[in-house]
Amino acid sequence: MSLAPAAQLQHTPGERGLSRILWFLRDVLVLTRRSLIHVIRDPAQLADVTIQPIMFVVLFTFVFGSAIRLPGGGNYHEYVVAGIFGITMAGAAPGVAVGLANDIQSGIIDRFRSLPMSRGAVLAGRLTADLMTAVLGLIVVVAVGVAVGWRVHTNPQDVLAGFALALLFNYAMSWAGAAAGLWLHNPESAQAMAFVVFFPMIFVSNAFVALQNMPIWLRVVAEWNPVSTVTASCRELFGNPNPSAAVQVWPLQHPELATIICALALLAVFVPISIRLYRREDLT
Amino acid sequence: MGEHEPILVEGLVKVYGKTRAVDGLDLVVAKGSVVAVLGPNGAGKTTLIRILATLAKPTGGRAMVAGYDVASHPAQVRRNIGIAGQSESIDEYLTGRQNLVMVGELSRLPRSEAKLRAATLLGRFELNDAADRPTKTYSGGMRRKLDLAASMITQPEVLFLDEPTTGLDPRARMGMWQLIRELGDAGTTILLTTQYLDEADQLAHNIAVVDSGKVIAWGSPDQLKTQVGGAVLEVTLPATADTEVAAALLRGAISKSVTVDQRRHKLTLPTTEETGLVTKVIRALDAGDIPVDDVTVRRPALDDVFMTLTGHGAETDKEAAA
């Protein structure tokens, strides 16, 4: 081989339309593959869609479950699995935030930005890989759920709709995580922030306990928490016990619609913010 | 594509807050040449490279790379450049080969060609044995070589190297020099920054000395050295010898301007056009029964150049702006 410079790469002026989209998709594919290699090399990254939901299911069915009575009765094992769906999907955000912060610190983002690649592909690639790990999380929760006696009592379309809603929520939360990672660009801060936002979000919800017993001020937060609406949607669509249906607030009376609106709102806010933060010159 | 200078910089300015990191910098780099931008920390070297590589936007002035304006046509610029920074831009979880193939594909090479180029570069940069290990396990020198290989994946017309040997051990540094020389010999236009004076001397056809965001001197290494003065002859005597007696002897026989370094037992005298100076010195000392340990002709180092031009040494560490 020679180390001589090649003739100048073909000049493609004003590349637009279809070819631009195809290049974008190819870049996303390359970067999705990169993120999946990360997961294979460092399986600990999968803990929040594997070990964590298994832990929660075991903890809440066998440890706390026997002490929890649902308002209006109902099997707690059947109740809690949809809650684990909800929190596992919300759990995507911290992972994305820490991953992007790591990328910025490692200098790889500088490399990407000096290449003639699509600008949005770095974020899209990571989020696509993240959606794939969310699907894995879904499978894990279904498997453990079935093992502890969780069953669905509706038709397959409803069950699939439940899964789809959960994934949509996951995707929207990932963009929020992306914005946080790009804003903080420090893995430790991203981790800390994730803890501060994420923990209240999953516990101040109907994921593990019914809202009826909470003090009023906390209850209002929990009623409007999207983790509650996505959980309530899943319970409704799976035919599991759903005491939230008795709570007379709009998001819990229309949990599917509330989840969709919330997801779209998150996307409308955090997609442009993330892209703007990514393009910021002093990002690295 | 018409004729163009690979790098053309006119009155470039970059302001960060109140700091003028680059402050009216001019620079022209001819096709196929290797130019070193030499200066202390905070002189604006990294900012210059980041602007030329489209990673930062200029505040004022103009910079053209490969015939395109970096501010208005960044995409075209990116297609014709490679950059290796002082912190390696490589993915720790991926293997060396996966890193190169990824960068190749993102540079729009077909996957098969990216693989082919990656294999060739891994061989060329002597990374074959480690090619399929995650780069986490690489040494500093290997990481730097891989980073350089990544920047060469499309055989770009212009290559930017930001302090390519900072932090490397001497052996890795030599290896990096060898690679850069070969890339330069093969016709790639290279702009590198360095704070090592010997590095600029070793690698570059031309040196731009920068200080406070401006080019304060430009020329070949030899031209810059001539600015400071000619070579000197250094004579080292054994510890037992009397340096003052020896100096007096040489002042009488050869030149009035002999300087003495008592502590290191050294005499220094300027070289002149006349030949046979070394022989004369040794004969004179021998006749006075003064033994000689060592005689060397020392050309002024670029450190001396920097001292003459800026009034402060090159090591002066002003807080980096970027």
Image (spheres, coloured by chain):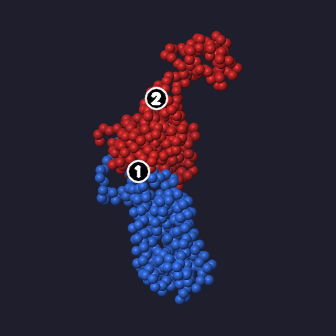
**Residue hosting label 2:** B224
Residue appearing at x 53%, y 62% in the figure:
A190
Look at the image and give the colour of chain A: blue
**Label 1 chain ID:** A
Q: Can residue A55 be seen in this view?
A: yes
Q: Can residue B183 be seen in this view?
A: no
Q: Which amino acid does label 2 sit on?
A: Leu
Say which element carries label 2.
helix
Q: Between residues B94 and B268, which one lies in front from this camera angle?
A: B268
**Residue hosting label 1:** A115
What x and y, as percent, mark residue A45? 54, 63
Look at the image and give the colour of chain B: red
Residue A267, placed above or below residue A233:
above
Q: Which amino acid does label 1 sit on?
A: Leu
Q: Between residues B187 and A92, which one lies in front from this camera angle?
A: A92
Q: Are marks 2 and 1 in contact (CB under 8 Å)?
A: no
Residue appearing at x 38%, y 60% in the figure:
A25
Give the quarter of the image for residue A48.
bottom right
Residue B37, placed above or below residue A77:
above
Residue appearing at x 49%, y 26% in the figure:
B228
**Label 2 chain ID:** B
Few, some or many residues within 10 Å of mark 2 (<14, 14–19, 20+): many
Q: Between residues A216 and B253, which one lies in front from this camera angle?
A: A216
Q: Which residue lies furthest to the right in this view?
A: B240
What x and y, as percent, mark residue A282? 45, 52
Few, some or many residues within 10 Å of mark 1 (<14, 14–19, 20+): many
* Same chain check for tags 2 and 1: no
What x and y, as percent, mark residue B58? 39, 47
What x and y, as percent, mark residue B143? 53, 47
